[in-house]
Amino acid sequence: MAIVIDVQGLSFSFGSGALTQPVLKNITISIHTGEIVLMTGPSGSGKTTFLTIIGGLRQAHHGSVMVLDRQLINSTEQIKVSVRQQIGYIFQQHNLLKSLTALQNVSMTLEMQNSMTEQQRLEHSAEMLRAVGLGERLNYLPDQLSAGQRQRVSIARALVGQPKIVLADEPTASLDKQSGHEAVSILKRLAKESKTTILLVTHDYRILDIADRVVELEDGKIKNA
Amino acid sequence: MNGIAWFYFPARLAWRQLIFDRTKLIAATSGVLFACVLVFMQLGFRDSLYASAASAPVKLNGDLFLMHKQSEAMWRPVQFKRSELMRTLGHAAVAEVYPLYSALAPFKNIETQIKRTLMVYGLDPDSMIFDLTGLKNKQTELRLKDTVLFDEFSRPEFGPMRQLLMAGQHTTEINDYKVTVIGLFRLGVSFASDGNVITSDLNFMRIFPNRNVSDIDLGVIRLQPNTSIKQTQNELRSRLNESVNIFTYEELLEYEMNYWANIAPIGFIFGFGTVMGLVVGLVIVYQILFTDITNHRNEFATLKAMGYEHGYFVRVVFASAFFLAILGFIPGYFLSIFLYQLAESQTFMPMPMNISKVLTVFVFILSMCATAGLLAIRKLKSANPADMF
C-alpha cells in the first residue's frame, strides 16, 4: 500500500534562543492509504502541533514531512495551500460558519473546485449530509443543531471534497459518549468506503476501537511506533 | 478560481455574513448613511452657495463687463469712472454700453418696520441689463420718481410683498428714503444679500445721495451682431485704464464663483465639512469591518485550514465594504433629497440634487468604504489557523 504521510526525523520547537521549547523530538512515522491512525497522549504532548504540521498549517524546519508526495518542511505558501485543499480537517470545535446553513457550510469545501456547477455542489453536499444522517436538517443553521449534529456537519464538510487524508483534532472532545461514538463511527464508515486515510488525535479512550493503529505521543516522542 | 467565481463566492459569503446579524447590519448601514447624508449636505450647501452667488450675474444681459480690479465680487464693488465705460464706445464693434450701480442698504419691512439689509441695483430701465420678466413690463413706470421693483424671492423677513402690494401697501423706506414698490421680479437670495431691489439710475442717486452718477459699479457692454467677443475684449483691454478688468459673461461668472470658493472662507468651510464627513464615515466603517473580521476570525481561520487563500478573504472584506456602501447610500440618498427640500424651504436658496452630485457622493462613499476595508484587512493576517487549534 502507498504511503500518504511519511514523516522522518521531524523536530519542532516553539520560541527561540534560551526560551526554546521543544515540542516534537525526532518523530518518524508512516501512514498508508486507507489507514485509520489514532494518536493519543496527554495534554501538551505535541499531538495538535503534529497535526497542524501535517495539515500544512504550521511551518516546520527540521526533518522531512512528505504529505501526498509534497515536502512540507520549509515549503512555500502555495504548496501548503494545495496540500490543505486535498485534506479534510475536522476540528475540536465544530468551527462551522454560523451564518451559513448546514448545506451551505458543507458546500464551502466545494466552492474551491471550479469543475462543478452550483447545482452539483449542492447535490453533493446534500448527499454527504444524508450520509451523516442529517438529510432532514439541510437548511438548519449551526445554532439550531445539537453539538453532535454540528460535529457531523463538520465531518460531512471534511469528507465532501473526497480528500485523500482526513485530519481530526479531538473531534469528540465536546460531545457526550453516545454522539461522540456515533460521529467517529460515521467517519470510519465513510472513510473505509472511499479509502480515505484518517489521522485522528484524541485522548478520548472511548473511541480507540475504531482505529487500525494507535500511536502514543509523550513529551514529543512516539512511544510504541 | 475563474472569472465569476473569483468574486461571486467571496461576495456571497460576505453578504450571508452581513445579513445574518440584522442588528449589526442596521448599525453599520446607519453609519454609512450618516456619512452619506453629511457629505450630501455639505456639497449641497456649497453648490447652493455657488449657485446663489451667481444668481445676479447669471441674469446679466451683455457681452462684455467692466469691473474695477479691486472689486473682489459684485456684491462688494469698488467704483470706477463712467468715462472708462464710455471710452469703449470708441471701438467699432461696441453697440451700446450701460452702467450698473449697486449698493447694500437697509430696507424697512412694511409690516414690522424692522430694517434689514438688501442689495439695491440702479440701472437705466430701458437697458434691460438684467434679463428679468418682472422688469420688462415696468420699464416706463420705473422712470417715475422714487419707484422700485422688489425681488419676490427675497427672504420672508422683508415682508410678504405680493400680499402687501395687493392690499395697496406699497410705500416703504430704503436707506431711510421713502420709495414706492411698483412691482415684483424674481432673482433670488445669495450669501451676500438677503434680498434685492431694482430701481432706475436716477432713483438710485436719490436713495443714495452720497453716490455720484459718474462713479459706477459695473459696466455692461453689448457688441454689434456677428463680432468676435474674444477679439473685441483683447482690443478693448489695451485701450482701457489698467485699473479695470474686462470680462466676458463666462469669465464674470467664474470670477464670482471663485470669490466664494477660494477668497471667501465659506468654500473652504464646506470643503472641510465634506472631508470631515468622509473621515467620520471612514472610522465608522473601519470599526465595523474590523470588529467583523475579529468576530469571524475563527471562521476565516477554519476556511484557511480548508485551503482558502488570503486573497479570498481580502475579497470578502472588500465585498462587505461594497455592500455597506450600497446599503448606506440608497437610504442616505433619499434622506438627503428630503433634507434638501427642507433646507430649501428654510434658507430660500436653491439646493438642486443632480446626477453629478449623486455620482460624486457615491464615489466618495465607495472609496471611503474601500479605504476602510484596506485598513481592516491588516487584521486578517492574525487569523492564523495554526494558532487557533
Image: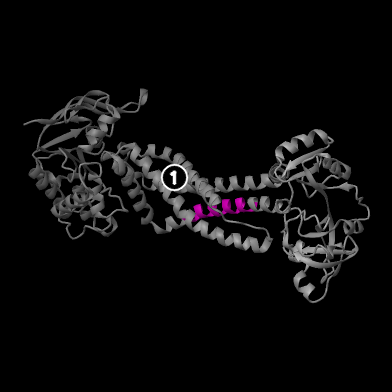
Say which of B295 and B26 sits in front.
B26
The quarter of the picture where the C terminus of chain A appears is top left
Farthest residue to the left: give it: A1
Q: Residue at x 67, y 46 (%)?
A: B269
Mainly helix, strand or loop, the magenta region?
Answer: helix
What kind of residue is marked 1? Phe
Indicate yes or no whether the magenta region holds residue B32: yes
Q: Is residue A105 left or right of residue A205?
A: right
First to last magenta residue range: B29-45
Neighbourhood count class around disc 1 (C-alpha, 10 Å): few under 14, some 14–19, many 20 upward: many
Q: Is residue A219 above or below residue A112?
A: above
In what element is the residue under mark 1? helix
Residue B150 sits in quarter: bottom right
Q: How many marks?
A: 1
> Which quadrant is the N terminus of chain A positioned in?
top left
Question: Where on the picture, by quarter, is residue A110?
Answer: top left
State the image coordinates of residue B260 (x, y, percent, origin top left). Answer: 71, 46
Residue B151 magenta: no
Tell me if residue A172 can be seen.
no
Residue B7: % across, % down: 34, 43
Q: Nearer the viewer, residue A215 or A74?
A: A74
Q: Which of these two is toward me, B72 or A145?
A: B72
Instruction: Residue under label 1, please give it.
Output: B290
Horizontally, residue B365 falls left or right of residue B233, namely left
| Horizontal relation, residue B60 to residue B295: left or right | right
* Position above or below: B185 against B129: below
Q: Is residue B37 visible?
A: yes
Query: Callout 1: residue from which chain?
Result: B
Q: Where residue B45 appears, x then y in whole percent?
A: 64, 53
User: How far from the left and from the top, in percent, is residue A41?
Assistant: 19, 37
